Image: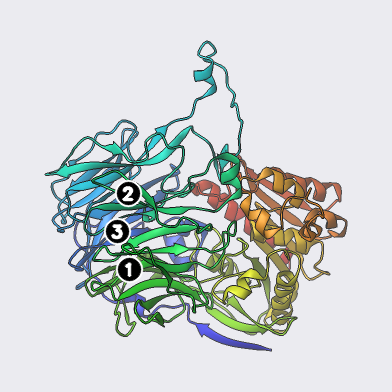
């Protein structure tokens, strides 16, 4: 039995009036052919302006943000800084240098905006007036910097810089300058998509006055670890206290094997005057990240996970009384995650983002009462949040709309769209309807499944369908707008998209999220099949022509289903997936992940039951065409996993194709590679799922 609700793919509210300043660069135009086609294509997807890094001014009247655009012909990006008024929605382009300007930050009194500019291979801090005038360079640092923030008083700033501390083989053997080797004695020699470069991200603090900085001080001198944490280096993991006396920073002070086995990051408090460092979360052995001080500097909030080694544990909202050291979990009675914390001016409440039923909404926690209330509703995802006075703004997306900036009324949750970066695209293409259905699983629970329809859906026709298998494995199938796994492009190619929130995903309570641990081939796989079997009953679904696609754990799911699907599918696509759990365990780098999810290494006695779910053990059952995609720089799931799968399919005589991208990682990021990926993706599905 299914219950359903509908989210219209046409955004009538989206096209409301917006004033554009003459300085704004015209958005990328569509061709006559693209306008005539009226549907989303890979080429149009790369014409989207990508909104990010929004920052609210101290008076709450203006938001600065970045827009990144890509040139497919050159495979290059250009990032510029814009501003939008929270009142009349006037948009102004503030930078137009060649290359990238990003990391915009308001000076505390709102008189100017600092930003990073890439020039001649180096990245430095620049400043400008709020209207974009009087741009001047602030720093000249050897090797450039990676990020910065002003102190609340404006008399200091910190910046991030890579510091070389490890010795290369050529430095060890200076008489062999042409030798090309890495000498490795410990783990974490590579991470996600790059080998160790012998450097560490450190925080430098400097005096700042009238546009000039003093001699910077490395507050992590000679320490062989990063802040913020690799591999994402998110500035939000570092924060100034409002009184300017402290910097709170996130760090995982472990190396090598210890680092590979642990998620234990901590929040450290650095005293600007004395240089002393205090570990605020000592004894809390899971992830502790994203510190945010209360306005009076007496409390600090941060995100904390309880379970050591479990990277997808509940994200709790903790606060600490800095005078007494007393710690309080404000989300003890709240069964979902918490992120992106903003204190109100009086310190009585904290706004944050949390997932609920595969959407991400704004919530408010009353600090004294420990009560949590939902502020926003709707079928969308908020991904960032900023508060100045009574003005609350956030970045919002959905399956049918790329990120834009919205103003939120904290009292009633009403939302006002401020930016319309891709209006020219939405004016000329039609999005497919997005519908949520609650499907009954084999264990009699309700599962939310998103159904995305072709833009010109005809209920009297039969459409082939695609089952989308999510990665993670603990990532929600929420209202995300992806520039790779884009549901609207799939629907625009005349497919019904079935996207289930199967077991092992957040936003439905921690028990639902945890249920996949140690059970990769269990209930969550039945959930996939339940969603397909339910949709096959619909008269508009061609039950004889259904494919399954996915990346990462989603590709593992495809490999598993290939050996267990009982003729449900006619085609598979697996991108960067785990094929052999034993070889994957010894190939990956963040070993805390398989230790938790699989129960430990395959040589453990007794051997964890999880290894019985390795897809390679069921290749003898493969009978369906499969395309396999992988990247040469993927170190999370090394490409050899997918070569094993392709070779097995070839040896079994299964129609199969391999796409190997030597310069891509776990994702396909370069414009031309991405467009080729999409063309091959739909070429493969069309070949096997569409009637000739």
Relative image position of residue 349 (x, y in whole percent): 32, 76
Describe residue 481's horizontal placement relative to residue 493 as left or right. Answer: left
Describe residue 171's horizontal placement relative to residue 437 as left or right. Answer: left
Relative image position of residue 523 (x, y in whole percent): 73, 72
Relative image position of residue 75 (x, y in whole percent): 45, 44
Q: Of callouts 1 and 3, which one flags the residue occurring earlier in the amino acid sequence? A: 3
Residue that protrudes farthest toward the front in the picture: 324
Q: Which mark is residue 498?
A: none
Is any part of residue 30 visible from this angle?
no
Instruction: Give SS at disc 3.
Output: strand
Instruction: Give SS at disc 2.
Output: strand
Q: Nearer the viewer, residue 31 or 55?
A: 55
Q: Of callouts 2 and 3, which one flags the residue occurring earlier in the amino acid sequence? A: 3
Describe residue 110's horizontal placement relative to residue 517 as left or right. Answer: left
Residue at image position (34%, 32%) is 143
Circles 1 and 3: CB atoms closer than 8 Å: no
Q: Nearer the viewer, residue 108 or 48?
A: 108
Colour scheme used in the picture?
A: rainbow
| Tag in front: 1 or 3 | 1
| Tag in front: 1 or 2 | 2
Q: Of callouts 1 and 2, which one flags the residue occurring earlier in the amino acid sequence? A: 2
Relative image position of residue 500 (x, y in whole percent): 63, 73
Circles 1 and 2: CB atoms closer than 8 Å: no
Mark 2 nearby-residue class (10 Å; few <14, some 14–19, many ≥20): many
- Residue located beneath label 3 in the image: 65
| Tag in front: 2 or 3 | 2
The quarter of the rendered structure image containing the C terminus is bottom right
- Residue located beneath label 2 in the image: 270
Circles 2 and 3: CB atoms closer than 8 Å: no
Quarter of the image holding residue 308?
A: bottom right
Quarter of the image holding residue 377?
A: bottom left
Q: Which mark is residue 342?
A: 1
């Amino acid at each position: 039995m299914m219950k359903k609700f509908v989210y219209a793919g046409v955004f009538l509210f989206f096209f409301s009036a917006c004033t554009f300043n003459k300085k704004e660069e015209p958005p990328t135009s569509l061709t006559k052919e693209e306008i005539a086609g009226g549907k989303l294509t890979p080429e149009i997807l790369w014409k989207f302006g990508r909104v990010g890094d929004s920052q609210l001014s101290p008076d709450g009247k203006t938001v600065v943000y970045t827009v990144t655009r890509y040139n497919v012909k050159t495979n290059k990006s250009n990032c510029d800084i814009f501003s939008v008024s929270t009142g009349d929605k006037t948009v102004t382009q503030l930078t137009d240098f060649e290359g990238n300007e990003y990391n915009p930050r308001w000076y505390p009194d709102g008189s100017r905006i600092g930003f990073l500019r890439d020039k001649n291979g180096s990245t430095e801090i620049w400043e400008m007036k709020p209207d974009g005038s009087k741009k001047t360079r602030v720093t000249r640092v050897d090797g450039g910097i990676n990020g910065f923030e002003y102190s609340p008083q404006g008399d200091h700033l910190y910046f991030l810089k890579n510091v070389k501390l490890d010795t290369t083989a050529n430095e060890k053997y200076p008489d062999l300058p042409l030798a090309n080797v890495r000498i490795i004695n410990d783990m974490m020699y590579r991470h996600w998509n790059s080998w160790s470069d012998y450097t560490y991200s450190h925080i430098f603090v400097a005096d700042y006055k009238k546009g000039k900085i003093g001699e910077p001080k490395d507050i992590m001198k000679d320490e062989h670890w990063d802040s913020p944490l690799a591999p994402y280096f998110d500035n939000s993991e570092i924060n100034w206290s409002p009184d300017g006396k402290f910097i709170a920073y996130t760090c995982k002070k472990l190396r090598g094997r210890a680092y590979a086995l642990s998620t234990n990051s901590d929040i450290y408090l650095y005293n600007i005057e004395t240089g002393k460092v205090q570990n605020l979360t000592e004894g809390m052995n899971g992830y502790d990240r994203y510190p945010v001080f209360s306005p009076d500097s007496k409390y600090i909030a941060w995100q904390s996970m309880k379970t050591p080694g479990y990277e997808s544990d509940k994200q709790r909202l903790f606060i600490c009384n800095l005078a007494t050291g007393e710690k309080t979990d404000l989300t003890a009675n709240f069964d979902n995650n918490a992120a992106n914390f903003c204190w109100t001016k009086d310190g009585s409440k904290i706004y944050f983002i949390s997932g609920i039923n595969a959407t991400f909404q704004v919530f408010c926690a009353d600090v004294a009462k420990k009560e949590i209330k939902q502020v926003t509703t709707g079928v969308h995802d908020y991904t960032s949040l900023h508060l100045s006075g009574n003005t609350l703004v956030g970045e919002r997306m959905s399956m049918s709309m790329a990120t834009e900036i919205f103003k939120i009324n904290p009292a009633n949750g009403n939302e006002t769209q401020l930016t319309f970066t891709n209006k020219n695209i939405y004016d000329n293409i039609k999005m497919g309807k997005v519908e949520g259905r609650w499907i009954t699983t084999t264990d009699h629970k309700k599962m939310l499944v998103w159904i995305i329809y072709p833009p010109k859906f005809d209920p009297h026709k039969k459409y082939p369908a695609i089952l989308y298998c999510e990665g993670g494995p603990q990532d929600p199938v929420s209202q995300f707008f992806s520039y790779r796994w884009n549901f609207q492009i799939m629907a625009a190619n005349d497919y019904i998209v079935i996207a289930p929130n199967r077991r092992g995903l957040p936003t439905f309570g921690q028990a639902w999220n945890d249920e996949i641990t140690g059970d990769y081939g269990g209930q969550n796989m039945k959930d996939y099949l339940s969603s397909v079997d339910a949709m096959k009953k619909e008269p508009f679904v061609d039950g004889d022509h259904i494919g399954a696609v996915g990346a990462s754990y989603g590709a593992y799911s495809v490999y598993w289903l290939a050996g267990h699907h009982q003729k449900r599918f006619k085609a598979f696509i697996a991108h960067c997936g785990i094929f052999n759990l034993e070889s994957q365990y010894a190939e990956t780098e963040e070993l805390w992940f398989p230790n938790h999810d699989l129960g430990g290494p395959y040589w453990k006695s007794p051997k964890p039951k999880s290894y019985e779910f390795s897809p390679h053990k069921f290749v003898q059952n493969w009978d369906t065409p499969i395309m396999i995609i992988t990247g040469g720089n993927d170190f999370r799931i090394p490409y050899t996993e997918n070569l094993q799968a392709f070779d097995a399919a070839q040896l079994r005589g299964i129609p199969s194709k391999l796409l190997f991208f030597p310069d891509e990682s776990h994702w396909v990021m370069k414009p031309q590679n991405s467009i080729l990926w999409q063309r091959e993706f739909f070429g493969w599905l069309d070949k096997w799922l569409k009637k000739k």
